[in-house]
Amino acid sequence: MPLVARKWRPGQFVIFMIHPRGERVPMSVAIVNGSNIGMFIKKLGKTSIQLYNEFRVGDRLLALAGLLESLSS
């Protein structure tokens, strides 16, 4: 992901999956730091609750796709 992350900016959207049979979740990029991106995730639905309960900072996601335009575009 390092080459891709260089193009990302806070406020843009990516889509990720946490496991092969999971849903595709759009999420806003909050922080870009080198090859890492950060997102603020609110416990709102099935996947975000699973992320909160099972994942920790630095864990890897199954798939990440983007870059989607920001809502303000």
Image (cartoon, grey):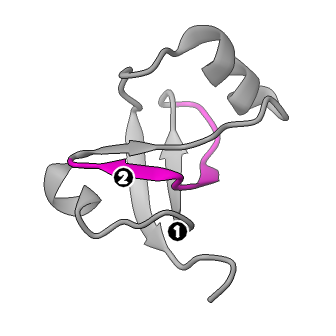
Image coords of residue 67 (percent x, y): 42, 69
Q: Earlier in the sequence, mark 2 or mark 1?
A: 1
Image quarter of residue 63: top left
User: Can you tell which of label 2 and label 1 is closer to the viewer?
Assistant: 2
Whether residue 67 is in magenta: the answer is no
User: Which of these two is toward me, 46 or 7?
Assistant: 7
User: Which of these two is toward me, 30 or 59?
Assistant: 30
Q: Residue at x 45, y 50 (%)?
A: 31
Q: Secondary structure at mark 1?
A: loop
Residue 54 vs 65, above or below: the answer is above
Question: Identity of the amino acid at label 1?
Answer: Gln
Q: Is residue 23 left or right of residue 39?
A: right
Image coords of residue 53 (percent x, y): 66, 10
Name the residue at the bottom extreme. Answer: 73
Residue 13 vs 2, above or below: the answer is below
What is the number of callouts on the image? 2
Image coords of residue 35 (percent x, y): 22, 46
Residue 12 bears which disc, if any? Answer: 1
Q: Secondary structure at mark 2?
A: strand
Question: Identity of the amino acid at label 2?
Answer: Val
User: Which of these two is toward me, 51 or 9?
Assistant: 9
In the rendered view of the protein, which quadrant contains the C terminus? bottom right
How crowded pointer 1 is (Cα within 10 Å; few <14, some 14-19, many 20+) is rated as some
